[in-house]
Amino acid sequence: MFRKILIANRGEIAVRIMRTCKEMGIAAVAVHSEADRSALHVQTADEAIFIGGSEPRESYLNIEKIIGAARACGAEAIHPGYGFLAENGAFAERCEAERFRFIGPPAAVIRSLGDKTTARTLMLNSAVPVIPGMTETEENPDNLAGQAREIGYPVLLKAAAGGGGKGMRVVSDPEKLKDAFDEATSEAQNAFGNGALYLEKYLERPRHVEIQILADAHGHIVHLCERECSLQRRHQKIIEESPSPALSRALREAMGEAAVNAARAAGYVNAGTVEFLLDAQGRFYFLEVNTRLQVEHPVTEMVTGIDLVREQIRIAAGEPLSWRQEEIQPRGHAIECRIYAEDPERGFIPSPGEILYLKEPAGPGIRVDSGIYSGFTVPTAYDPILSKLIVHAGDRPGAIERMVRALSEYVVLGVRTPVEFLLEVIRSDPFRSGETHTRLIDERFAGWKPSMSRADLACLAYAASRLSPRKAVPSGTGSERDHFPSPWETLGGWSL
């Protein structure tokens, strides 16, 4: 087993990986940019190495600096987390060449599955159901128009590289194809350094269901059931849960088997996620494979009791899987909400700045994977995710009520967050009934405005605390202490 691992990432995912490293007795090394000198992952690590300026290309995307840091600290392995270089085949290949164990799939697998058209061809040849569409990229919008007519509108214009909704546009008619092509190409080039696009059939109101898989280097592959990820905004997930309320036992088994087949066809090793779209008739179609740990991996951990990061590290060290398929028996229900520094009242634009006060929820069945603290300044250079709030209960109704409580207790001041927006979504009839789809947020919550946000109420409490009289009384030792509690100090007891 490794003695020291370098985490080539930042924020909440770096902190989360470090926690498992500490439990395994492995030293965890952080890398950080200028903007992250005081970040939580730096404070959590056993060792921290400065690697450059705040811009990602000067630090977290700089392969040479990360390899140099790993060499300098004597790390034996590198964990990429998610985002940045996590799905970069060149980075994985460089780690292998420098004899650092890359905690993820082999470089060749990342490359083959990272290109969406190559992955589609691979799945078609492996009898995995695939959405109708192209298997090669196209740089000429006029040629794409012909393909779109053949596939049938509406179509989805997608970047062949990357993910996370970047370089993706829904096109409903031929007149809009050229503008969508230009926008998607530019966005994909900026995000991934690759502007190649392809088309596939756009499914109206599908569900997004993904299967977590683990594969070791000895030929063993298991799936850890599914995650429902249909609640999305601009093709980015905001709420995830497991199990999916839409799947029967038979459908769950069929999708799990398809995911294992997909992984086996690709020669997969380590943790990954096979994503599917599910239509109203219960037919599922391969979407893509994420060759990394997912943002939403905690919901799988909560229902299975399996630490996915621990398994990633064990697999990278050459050890076999800890479980056979029949031993994996999910229990209860888990829900995750992503907490971003975003303003939901202004189109979810980023809301960087100093966190003046932070109060995280706690109690039975509640987990917070966080990368922030009171006094930390959220930088402008990176994805604005602050934390992930995860709850677990014996059944779905219990998990919903637990999430309502947890969100009601969550207070972040100084930056805007979508906590009150998430509360309204969780409380909505479609979510409670399990009738969700990928268009639900856009259709039901477009132009959302709160009547009075919890953040505004908390700010009023903060202001009141500054104006409240403070009564000083002598203590038994002759010193003085504050005796009069302000509204701010009792904020946790408010029903917001």
Image (cartoon, rainbow, N blue to C red):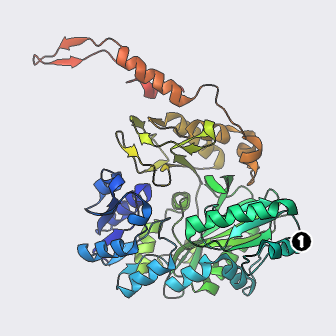
Instruction: Give the residue number, with chain letter if any, for mark 1.
Output: 149
Residue 253 lies, in percent from the top left, at 70, 72
| Quarter of the image that includes the C terminus | top right
Residue 425 lies, in percent from the top left, at 67, 41
Identified by mark 1, the residue type is: Arg
Would you call the spot at circle 1 few (<14 residues within 10 Å), some (14-19), or many (20 or more)?
Answer: few
Secondary structure of residue under mark 1: helix
| Quarter of the image that includes the N terminus | bottom left
Residue 133 lies, in percent from the top left, at 80, 75
Residue drawn at (39%, 81%), measured in percent from left and top?
95
Residue drawn at (35%, 85%), measured in percent from left and top?
98
Is any part of residue 155 visible from this angle? Answer: yes
In the displayed structure image, the side of residue 318 where residue 233 appears, left or right: right
In the displayed structure image, the side of residue 476 where residue 8 appears, left or right: right
Residue 260 lies, in percent from the top left, at 64, 79
In the displayed structure image, the side of residue 314 where residue 418 appears, left or right: right
